[in-house]
Amino acid sequence: MENTMDLEPAAAAKLVGREVPVLDKEGKATGKTERKPIAAAEVFACRVRDTAVTVITTSGEKLTGNLPVKAEK
C-alpha cells in the first residue's frame, strides 16, 4: 500500500514541531516547554485541511501546525 501525502515530508516537517520541556542547569523541568523541529525522516503521513497541517510521525505521535498565510495582492 502506498502512503499518499498532501505535502512532501521535508515541507511537512518544517510546519510542525514537538513540544519538549525546558530543563534547568540541574536537569529538572522548569514547567515551560519549547518547540523543537522534527526531521523529515520522522514523517510517516501528513494531511492538510484548510490551513491546518497534521503529521503522524514514525513513532506514532500526532503533531499539528499551520500553513503560512500568503499575502494578498
Image (cartoon, grey):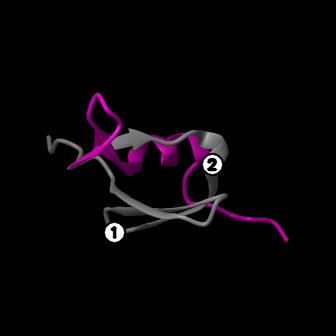
Expressed as whole percent of the image width and height from the top left, the position of residue 60 reads 61, 66
**Pointer 2 residue:** 42
Question: Can residue 35 be seen?
Answer: yes
Assess disc 1: are there few (<14), some (14-19) or many (≥20) residues with their C-alpha within 10 Å of its C-alpha.
few
Q: Residue at x 85, y 71 (%)?
A: 1
Q: Residue furthest right?
A: 1
In the displayed structure, would residue 66 be above or below residue 34? below
Q: Residue at x 15, y 45 (%)?
A: 72
Give the extent of the magenta segment.
1-30
Dot 2 lies on which element? helix
Quadrant in which residue 14 is drawn: top left
In the displayed structure, would residue 50 be above or below residue 44? below
**Pointer 1 residue:** 50
Question: Can residue 34 be seen?
Answer: no
In the displayed structure, would residue 12 be above or below residue 48? above
Assess disc 2: are there few (<14), some (14-19) or many (≥20) residues with their C-alpha within 10 Å of its C-alpha.
some
**Quadrant into which the C terminus falls:** top left
Of tags 2 and 1, which is closer to the observer? 2
Sequence-first tag of 2 and 1: 2
